[in-house]
Image: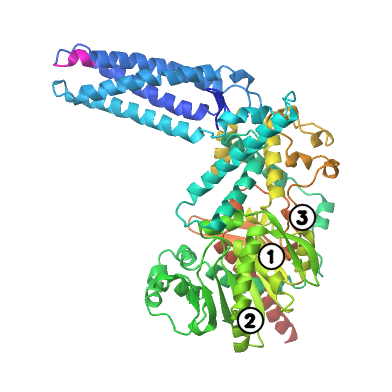
Amino acid sequence: MPGLVVFGRRWAIGSDDFVLPGAFELLVRLVWWMGILALYTVHKGQFSCPGGGLLHSYLLVLLVLLASIICALSALVYVSMQGTISNPGPRKSLPKLLYTRLLLYLPEFIWAVVGAVWVSDSSVRCEKTVINVVIGTVIASWVIIIFTIIGVVIVFDPLGGKKTFYLTDSVNRNLESSQSGQLLYNVKNTATRVWEKRIRLLCCCIVQDDDHRVAFTSIAELFRNYFSDTDLVPSDIAAGLTLLHQEQDKMESCPKEPEEVLCHSPSSLVTDDLDVELENAAHYMLFAAAAYGWPYYIYTNPFTALCKLNGDCCRNRPTDSDITGSDRHNFHFGSILKITGLQYRDFIHISFHNKIYEIPFFVALDHKKEAIVVAVRGTLSFEDILTDLSADCEDLTLEDVLENGFVHKGITQAANYIYRKLINDGILNQAFTIAPEYKLVIVGHSLGGGTASILAIMLRNSFPTLRCYAFSPPGGLLSKSLADYTKHFIVSVIVGKDLVARLSMPNMEDLKRRIVRIVANCNRPKYQILLRGCWYEVFGGDPDNFPTELDGRSQDALTQPLLAEESLMVHRSPSYNALEDESHLNSPLQYPHLYLPGKIIHIVEESSSRRLCSSDIKYTASWSNETVFSSILISPKMITDHMPDVVLKALNSLSQDQGSCISCQTRDYHTNVV
């Protein structure tokens, strides 16, 4: 729902967000009040001790004060439970109750100070139990006050004072256009500065240069554009994700039509080389995982990694290795050796240098596949995150191949950095001098997969036999023309419901539209949605069938936003533009559609039998296309499916299954011959 307006400004909290925290505080206050009442009743006639009169007055006033707070909290929780997310009408009295509750903090604060003074007074000589209880009440009062202040800071919206104009801009048409435009321009500038300050604060631990400042501004503009057209508070988004997950699970459990199954069944011609590519992908995924260095090795071997690395990491570096960047104690290099199984002499160049748009990579000789492998590291630092978030589009023109292809700006700059290193510094020339008959293979995971893909496009003309394996690359990477061009030499591997592989600005706009739609039209209070959602995520069960205003509506009616949805939109969003067939003719596309690179292998979990100490997960793989990844899927595995160890495990499982099948077929063939 729209953010709560209190003290003349908007806050990042809704009027229906006081149910759960209010109920928790109410429980604490009730237990506290009953304990003080029991103490007062037991010691009612024993206040003749020095300072007893003050003690009697303190407990009596505290009982009255706590009773007032309990009444205010009860009313606050009750009113906050009324209505739905998009129908705050039954909660219109909540701001007054909130003012009342906040006013009660003043006498509570004063009385907490009085209690602290009384406890510290050496002239008071009452029973130790009574004094300890008073100390406990004073501490509890201060704890609640401190947590309240922290809560106010968390829900404070820096744009709250200016959001009022921003929210009513689409409604108030009486302003002069120049005045309205100037006010809106000021609000947008303020919003950009707020996001930029947040990013700078988050990245305060890294050295900031001109590249960082440009990236901060670009990312701030992106965040401002994405969040500026909705008036959802964080709990609304959480409720929307919960509802979407359950709705998605209900749709997946429905039996598919036979025509739909046939349409998605891969043909034998398409799957001819699937087994070969899966075996290659399982092999090269080791190199992509090794690029992460010691964090990945310790993550996958938490109990033995340090012992295994201890012998190799402390020895001196080989003098014939080209290593740049910091690798204290050889931990990164030692981990790469352990993961890949290569020798020192097999490495041509290793770079641990890491800045924004400059990511680590290594070049090694793979004698098993007779390949020169360029492995690019994925996201592992704040600098890498900034590279990921620099999601503007820029042109990539390839001579004699394509023109006006769009690519992800930050990842392209990272690919340019590695390209200059490989070509200008003569690294690839050195490698092919050593092994001229070897082929060039570029691999990477996540950010590394996206960088490897664009790097492969840049090197394709010089190395026509080049191959690239991109594991879990970002979805918003290449325009359609470039994505089609890369099908000849790039293979992308995606596991399950990987979020990153579906991450693009159009997909994020679509997710925002779906959240607004399902939240605005659910007829249940938010606290019920969140409680049921938490139970479903933790304990499973059947998805809840929350009634919504969408039920029973015709498909034509669903193409227009409802009034409740419009109330959650500040102005017309690009996500709503996508709902109207003719809208793209009247307005330019804000975010062009970008796609995954190359041919796509999609690996899904077929079945799993879990026991107390073990799990047996079966995977299936098939060729897929970019349209399958045109929507973000909500799932607890949307993050874990992206992890490199999960990708490697899935590929190894498929390779082993294929190997066993091939050996079984060979054995059966020999038996028949005999």
Amino acid type, callout 3:
Thr
Residue 240: tell me if it is visible.
Answer: no
Residue that carries the numbered disc 1 in the rendered image? 492
Q: Give the CA separation, mark 3 to mark 1.
A: 14 Å
- Residue 308: percent from the left, percent from the top? 40, 73
Amino acid type, callout 1:
Ser
Secondary structure type for disc 3: helix
- Residue 437: percent from the left, percent from the top? 67, 88
Q: Looking at the image, do the residues carrying marks 2 and 3 touch, with CB atoms under 8 Å apart?
A: no
Is 370 magenta? The answer is no
Instruction: Please report whichever mark, 2 or 3, sits nearer to the chain's N-terminal start.
Output: 2
Q: Is residue 55 left or right of residue 573?
A: left
Q: Badge 1, how many Cα within 10 Å: few under 14, some, many 20+? A: many
> Most prominent secondary structure in the magenta stretch?
helix
Vertical relation: 66 (above or below) 586: above
Question: Which of the pair 10/40 is nearer the observer?
Answer: 10
Amino acid type, callout 2:
Ala
Secondary structure type for disc 2: strand
Question: Which of the pair 327/333 is nearer the observer?
Answer: 327
Residue that carries the numbered disc 3 in the rendered image? 627
Q: Quadrant of residue 288?
A: bottom right
Residue occupying image coordinates x 55% and y 46%: 196
Residue that carries the numbered disc 2 in the rendered image? 371
Which of the image's four quarters has the C terminus?
bottom right
Magenta-drawn segment: 50-55
Which of the image's four quarters has the N terminus?
top right
